[in-house]
Amino acid sequence: MAINLRFLGFSRNKTFPCALQPIHGKALKDARRPWFFAQAGAHASRAPGNRGAWHGYVEAGTASVGNTSPKTSFFLDLGASCVASILRDTPATSTPFMQRIPLTSHSTRARLIAIGGGGFAQGSDPALEAFVLRHAAGAATRIGYIATANGYTATAIARFHQRFGPHCAHTTDMPPGMQGAPAAQWLRSLDAVFVGGGNTARLLAHWREAGLDRLLLDAAGQGLLLAGVSAGAMVWFQAGLSDALGAGLAPLAGLGLFRGSFCPHYDSEPQRQPALHAAIASGQLPRGLALDDGAAVLLDVSGVREVCRARPDCTAYYLHARLGRCFSRRLSASA
């Protein structure tokens, strides 16, 4: 049995991280010959009892059989092509194999408010901060600010305290050199943490060197609400489109707490839309979210739960690839 599929990712003996729900293959009598009914853009996996279990993510697929008569091969190819065509044209919202917005968390307790741009750093969009506090502890919220991506600029830190201070119980910001036990204790004292925007590559390098990435992921797993804007939101996903490396917009791997990709400033930086569409269509980036400035989404283990629009004309989009093209869908206020 030969499987003729176009693979976007491959991992042996464990699930390759992606934004998709599994469609398990139906094995034939010979365990070495699995059969897949693979929806275009879906996750196919070999049946658990098969030898050399593997998992792959396919963009489109048909199946063919070798060492058979031409007539048999013709009808098998025709049938598989018809199945692939039917599945390919079936809207994601009508199939039980996928969640509506399948960008789920690897942690059952992790929650993230991802913001596309704007907010207190630009002196605008107070509804974004109100959205964060509503999903934290309201007026009793203890919130901390991490300004790694913007180099701990005094202006950004001051604006954080000015915006959040009057509306919550306590505000604090992480000192530049904090790490280890003091950083862990600081995180445990909070209900929410807000990560500012700036240079994503610098943020990741510093966090990994100081061990803050693991501390933050552990805190998120214990129920700490994560919030971030631009780079501070992108860092939590598998990957994003970033210009942090100084060579124009290019895919950049994140921490992978949430499956899929993330792109901020979708409406305010004209070069982002064509670059993002090309990266998703080619498989350089997995399916994911693109947010305008002023837009925010709440994600948890179930995927996207809510959309916030602080500006009348801003919105959030879900993008995915199908047959080498990128498609986008505007998200409703209650995704």
Image (cartoon, rainbow, N blue to C red):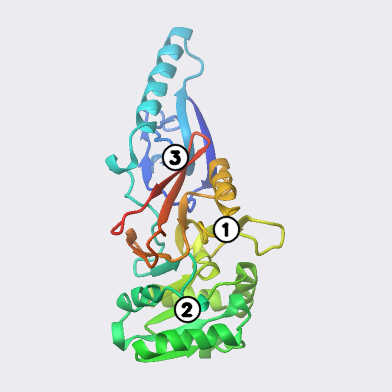
Disc 3 residue type? Gly
Nearest to the observer: residue 219 or residue 66: 219
Dot 2 surroundings within 10 Å: few (below 14), some, or many (20 or more)? Answer: many
The mark nearer the N terminus, 1 or 2, is 2
Confirm whether residue 53 shows in the render: no
Measured as percent of width and height from the top left, residue 117 is found at 49, 67
Under circle 3, the secondary element is loop
Q: Residue at x 38, y 45 (%)?
A: 22
Under circle 2, the secondary element is helix
The mark nearer the N terminus, 3 or 2, is 3
Residue on which disc 2 sits: 120
Disc 1 residue type? Glu
Q: Identify the disc placed on residue 41.
A: 3
Q: CA distance from mark 1 to mark 2?
A: 19 Å
| Quarter holding residue 249 | bottom right
Measured as percent of width and height from the top left, residue 299 is found at 37, 63
Disc 2 residue type? Phe
Q: Nearer the viewer, mark 3 or mark 1?
A: 1
Dot 1 surroundings within 10 Å: few (below 14), some, or many (20 or more)? Answer: few
Q: Residue at x 65, y 64 (%)?
A: 244
In the rendered view of the protein, which quadrant contains the C terminus?
A: bottom left
Q: CA distance from mark 3 to mark 2?
A: 38 Å
Answer above or below: position of 323 versus 114.
above
Measured as percent of width and height from the top left, residue 162 is found at 45, 88
Residue on which disc 1 sits: 269
